[in-house]
Image: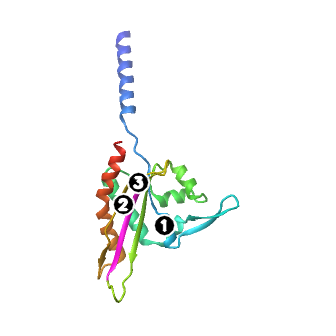
Amino acid sequence: MKKMKKTFLLATSLLFFIVIYGQVAKPVIMVVPSENWCEQNGFMQNIDNQEEMRKFPDFNKALQTSTELNSVIQLITELMGNRGLPLRSLEAALKNGANSSNMDVFVKEKVDIFFEIDWKATDRTKKNPKLSVQFFLKGIDAATGAQIAISSSNEKGCLSCNLLTLLTEAVYDVVDNFCVDLNKYFLK
């Protein structure tokens, strides 16, 4: 009976360690608009940083104002989730840390990787009646600031499309190459 109890405890302990160490923790990833996008679209705020005024992205204002930004973030979140990589919601994180700075929210959420998004849209003119967009997706290691993945779309134009349609096509164009770069980083 004593030997059976000892064997059971050993087997249970072994199983426990296999389960615990066999699971690889997935990184915490969040999609954010790039600082450049925020600057170009008027979503910056001045913050007094130790008696020095500095500009920081105002993610709350950007999310409340730009329907395109929200749609692109949701699409990337869905596409990455379909590939087994769940993303944390920037909007939910900002709501949970309502009176906190962006950095405090990111620390609280323990973000490991940022997916920065940016796009440049060219408006229709008489000379060029096409609306066009170029889209950029960049992966940044939150701890080191190192770029770990990047992909961009070629500038595409359309006579009758709206901006959201072009952005959706651009996201689909870049996501596969971006995931290839991301997998290379994870396999290092």
Q: Position of residue 67 (x, y in %)?
A: 43, 72
Q: Which mark is residue 46?
A: none
User: For the residue marked with disc 1, what is the amino acid?
Assistant: Asn
Query: Three-letter amino acid code at disc 2?
Result: Ile
Above or below, comparing residue 102 to residue 187 in the picture:
below
User: Neighbour class for label 2 at 10 Å: few (<14), some, many (≥20)?
Assistant: many
Residues drawn in magenta: 130-138
Compare residues 48 and 22 and report the one nearer the observer. 48
Q: Relative to the observer, which residue lies in front, 82 or 139? A: 139
As measured in the structure, the alpha-carbon distance from the residue carrying label 1 to the one carrying label 3 is 22 Å
Q: Is residue 63 visible?
A: no
Say whether residue 34 is left or right of residue 77.
right
Residue occupying the point 59% across, 67% down = 45
Residue that badge 3 annotates? 87
**Is residue 184 positioned above or below 160 on the image?**
above
Q: Quadrant of residue 76?
A: bottom left
Q: Contact (CB < 8 A) between labels 3 and 2?
A: yes
Q: Which mark is residue 36?
A: 1
Element at badge 3? loop
The secondary structure type at the circle numbered 2 is helix
Say whether marks 1 and 2 touch (CB < 8 Å).
Answer: no
Percent coordinates x, y for residue 60 in the rendering: 53, 65
Q: Residue at coordinates 50% horizontally, 68% vertically from top-left?
A: 38
Q: Are marks 1 and 3 in contact (CB under 8 Å)?
A: no
Q: Which quadrant would the N terminus be assigned to in this image?
A: top left
